[in-house]
Image: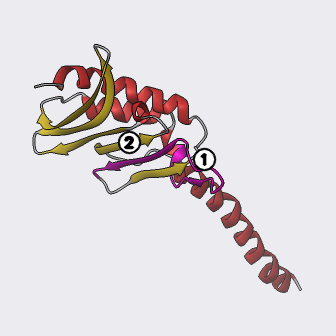
Amino acid sequence: MGGIMKNRILPKIFLLTLFVFGGMGCAASSHSTPPGQLKSFSFATGGSSRYEIRELSAIQEGQGIRLQIDTWLEINGEDQQIQINKVVQEPDLLPKLAKLIREQKLSDWNGFDGKNSIGLDGNSFSFLAVYDRGGKIQAKGHIKLPKNYQKGRTAILEIFEPYVKKYHGK
């Protein structure tokens, strides 16, 4: 009788343990920052005004960073489209962006695919961060945005702002 009970109970205990502890590991890893060094960061946002349209990316390219920025600004009372696409020597840029991802918990956005099919006009975004060990964080949305989006968006724009000023017109 003892052998029969062991044969029935032990597999159930094993499966319960696997479910509880295995599930916890999966949940934690799905929103954790991928291991390795950030090698590519891209963020695009749009809205009903051209001033809300921004495409920002920093991509490791050889010993430099390919900086790509496409945005609209008002300069001296005139609308100006700012476009930057050049390899720059900014070794601190990707580490700053990696720190932003951790501090703003942008990994919580991973897998977000929000849509509001009722709305015709409003904010939309796409985000992709790629790491050298193959991990990535990817999210997108139209009118429907992830938790802490505005805070994350503001932090991203603040990091890129000095580079717009530094490389615009050069």
Q: Residue shown at 18%/25% (left/top)?
A: 168
Mark 2 packing: few (<14 Cα in 10 Å), some, or many (20+)? many
Q: Which quadrant would residue 159 be assigned to in this image?
A: top left
Q: Which element is circle 1 on?
A: loop
Is 45 situated above or below 113? above
Task: Tell me the kind of residue under disc 1.
Answer: Lys
Is 34 situated above or below 153? below
Mark 1 packing: few (<14 Cα in 10 Å), some, or many (20+)? some
Is residue 115 magenta-colored? yes
Q: Residue shown at 22%/35% (left/top)?
A: 83
Q: Nearer the viewer, residue 117 or 106?
A: 117
Q: Nearer the viewer, residue 150 or 32?
A: 150
Q: Which residues are magenta?
A: 108-132
Residue 98 place in picture, x, y as percent? 36, 35
Residue 116 place in picture, x, y as percent? 63, 53
Is 9 situated above or below 68? below
Q: Nearer the viewer, residue 96 or 18?
A: 96
Q: Is residue 75 left or right of residue 138?
A: left
Is 12 situated above or below 18? below
Q: Which mark is residue 144?
A: 1
Marks 2 and 1 sit apart, C-alpha to C-alpha, by 16 Å
Q: Are marks 2 and 1 in contact (CB under 8 Å)?
A: no
Residue identifier under label 2: 43
Q: Nearer the viewer, residue 33 or 88?
A: 88
Q: Residue shown at 53%/50% (left/top)?
A: 141
Q: Residue shown at 66%/54% (left/top)?
A: 118
